[in-house]
Image: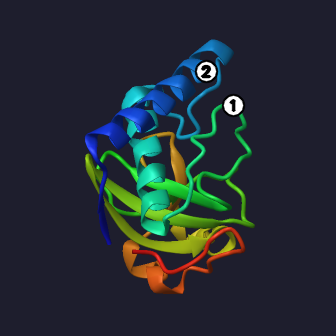
Amino acid sequence: MIITLTWAEVLLAAQVGCMRNVQCLENEWHDRSGDPTNTWTRNIEGTCGEMAVAKWLNVYWSGNVGDLNAADVGDLEVKTNTSRRWDDLMIQRENRTDRNYVSVLSFLPRFKICGWITGAEGKQDKYWREGKPGQPCYFVPRSDLHPLTTLPLPWWHEGTPT
């Protein structure tokens, strides 16, 4: 599924990404990936990926800033791959197992929504590996993701994704 954001949508999401990045710098929160470089890109394209999923589902995106435990879109976690080095969905050790994770590839302003997996399924030992040196996490291959048509749509969603 390819979703294209308008430039106005990109600007709105980028503002949220900037706010998140500044908040992290101000509070000396470390990037969960362990990679201190390129946080601006990851935050901005990450929020754009969240907006793309909300647009696909035709639901409101709050652009939450400040609550690290809040879900990204409704009760979904959105994992946007901005490096395009891998197209695997990456789940950090501290990510929740009781949420569904949606994999998105960023080609700003276009986003490819690839599939989804539960946190419990994604946090299996077989997916654990080193990304960059010293930055291991769970790398779920796209081939192991569930099709988007099987994504459980909870109470907050009405209708069929476009």
Q: CA distance from mark 2 to mark 1?
A: 7 Å
- From the top left corner, tell me how far across and down residue 137 is, in percent: 55, 53
Residue displayed at 55% across by 50% down: 61
Residue displayed at 37% across by 42% down: 9
Q: Considering only vertical position in the picture, is 136 above or below 140?
A: above
* Res 130 visible: no
Q: Residue furthest top?
A: 26
**Which residue type carries mark 2?**
Gln
Residue that label 1 marks: 66
Residue that label 2 marks: 23
Q: Considering only vertical position in the picture, is 4 above or below 148?
A: above
Whether residues under marks 2 and 1 lie with C-beta atoms below 8 angstroms apart, the answer is yes
Comparing 91 with 42, the one in front is 42
Mark 2: few/some/many CA within 10 Å (<14, 14-19, 20+):
some
**Which residue type carries mark 1?**
Gly
Q: Is residue 65 left or right of residue 141?
A: right
Please tell me how many numbered marks the rendered image carries. 2
Q: Residue furthest bottom?
A: 150
Figure quadrant of residue 42: top left
Q: Is residue 150 left or right of residue 81?
A: right
- From the top left corner, tell me how far across and down residue 36 is, in percent: 47, 26
Q: Secondary structure beneath disc 1? A: loop
* Res 54 visible: yes
Q: Secondary structure beneath disc 2? A: helix
Comparing 89 with 135, the one in front is 89
- From the top left corner, tell me how far across and down residue 104 is, in percent: 40, 60
Residue displayed at 63% across by 33% down: 65
Residue displayed at 59% across by 38% down: 32
